[in-house]
Image: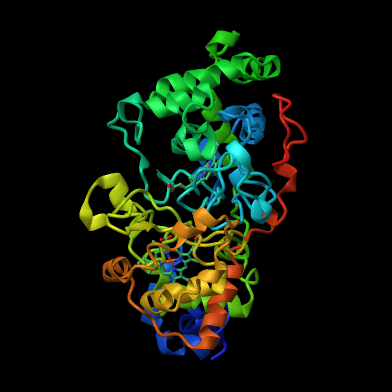
Amino acid sequence: MFSLRPVLLIAIVLCLLASVGPATLWGQRPGGVAQAEGSPSVISKFIARLPKPVKDRDYYDDGRPDPLKVELGRLLFFDKLLSGNRNISCASCHHSLTDTGDGLSLPVGEGGRGLGITRDTGSGLDAIHERVPRNAPPVFNLGAREFHRMFHDGRLEVDPSQPSGFISPAGDDFPEGLDNVLAAQAMFPVTSPAEMAGQGNENEISQAAALGDLPLLWELLAQRLRANDTYVELFIQTFPDINAREDITYVHAANAIGAFESSAWRADQSPFDRFLRGDRQAMSVRARKGMHLFYGKAGCVACHNGSFQTDHEFYAVCMPQIGPGKGDGATGHEDFGREQATGNEADRFKFRTPTLRNVALTGPWGHVGAFNDLRDMVLHQLDTVESMQSYDRYQVVLPYREDLAAIDFQVLNDPDLVSDIVEANELKPRRLSKKEVDLLMEFMYALTDPNSIDIRRDTPMAVPSGLPLAE
Ligand code: HEC
Ligand code: HEC
């Protein structure tokens, strides 16, 4: 009897652990919303769907890029010297005061004035010619290696079989020597007339863009950097293969910009991240219930899976199309999404699954910023077609100009074009109660890294060109 007691005790404890163990992962016994899915087999499937915690080695340079490169990249990112008319920087659309985006549904490119929702469309000859056709995505966590595709349609992606290492819109013109796909991305905004290069004959960069001569365009930008003594010194200090002014190329600049983006805007300390690392109390009970819905009944995990809640694949989710579009369809105001990159009609209206870290900070949401309320965006994902049919177009965040506004809703005004988007939809509706949606929202909020809430520290006080930082 005496010797049996500890054994019995251990057996009882083991039995208890087996019955409630997995449930304690979200700190509650299966009950409430979780009830229907509370059986042990469902629970273990659920746990299998939770991603592994993010680690340093998931990022380029194991999360420790060269500080000199980062600092140089920061200056370049905020310097309007890289735009044809010296009037817009990367930061104008990805600002540290607007959570690495611009707070608008669609960006106002070169020629506009002001920052975030105060940005206007400019005046006189400098005024913008059109809106930029897609929402400026946030730049959080893009220094993680798994983000192997850039842009809403993934038109730039890692491909070791290419001489440059990437499939890109620049094709054979794309240079070698780029550190990674994030750095490679920084080659493109400077070539876009609406974003940074300028229109037609306005300047030498816009002329190169109009000719489609990208190697010339990148060389002209390098010349601007070579002409600036402060930059020359910084490039020589930073890059071992730069010994003199002439050695500076725009590829070096892009590599520095990529290093800045990946180090400054890493965001993997959200309550959810801490929970995955084993801090069971990091998320509230309500957020944990919301997580259970996300990885279970609500079906979000089908696409928003993996460490950063994206499978990096493309789906048609019936997103209302606004703005000038990408030149697709008879009107030219449609945006065929992934088909733009692949030329494959089966990819029409498909867009890349976005990461959801910091999602509460990065509105408006969707590839054209059609939703200005995160709850409406989530409700859209729960019943896309219903949401499209009841879409409230007054929520778009776009500075008004009559001629631009006349184009903004051309697709939505055309029942045939709307029905094309509806027919392509791949996301089936899921029924959730209002209370369950509340819980799902709690989980969305638990994806915010507290370090990302205030990133003013990333804004330099001045840049080497001496150009104004104010927008
Ligand atoms: C006029 C606004 C604007 C400017 C200026 C701008 N961007 Fe962007 N950025 C965008 C838009 C819009 C997209 C999405 C385009 C698309 O998907 O077709 C984008 C996409 C990106 C992406 C890809 C994000 C992802 O998730 O795929 C990165 C990174 C980025 N920009 C960095 C930069 C850098 C670096 C610069 C400066 C060299 C810059 N941007 C300048 C608007 C801008
Ligand atoms: C079929 C794949 C799929 C499923 C399932 C799915 N999503 Fe998405 N999600 C996407 C795609 C693709 C986009 C981008 C669509 C676009 O911009 O046109 C997106 C966009 C979003 C956005 C906007 C993010 C941003 O930065 O703009 C949120 C929020 C979101 N989804 C949440 C959810 C939630 C919550 C669920 C579950 C209820 C869910 N999604 C289910 C594919 C999916």
Q: Residue at x 35, y 24 (%)?
A: 173
Residue 123 can be seen in this image = yes
Q: Is residue 39 above or below residue 146?
A: below
Q: Residue at x 60, y 64 (%)?
A: 360
Q: Position of residue 350 (x, y in %)?
A: 33, 58
Q: Quick check: which quadrant has ligand 2?
A: bottom left
What is the quadrant of residue 184 in the picture?
top left
Toward the viewer: 164 or 2? 164
Q: Position of residue 310 (x, y in %)?
A: 43, 58
Q: Residue at x 61, y 68 (%)?
A: 446
Toward the viewer: 366 or 217? 217
Q: Residue furthest right?
A: 461
Q: Position of residue 395 (x, y in %)?
A: 56, 69
What is the quadrant of residue 463 in the picture?
top right
Q: Is residue 323 above or below residue 211?
A: below
How many numbered discs, if any? 0
- Left or right of 41 on screen, residue 32: right
In which quadrant is the C terminus drawn?
top right
Q: Is residue 103 above or below residue 62?
A: below
Q: Position of residue 102 (x, y in %)?
A: 61, 51
Q: Residue at x 55, y 48 (%)?
A: 139
Residue 25 can be seen in this image = no
Q: Is residue 298 above or below residue 179?
A: below
Coloring scheme used = rainbow
Toward the viewer: 423 or 413? 413
- Left or right of 143 on screen, residue 69: right
Q: Residue furthest left?
A: 345
Toward the viewer: 285 or 168? 168
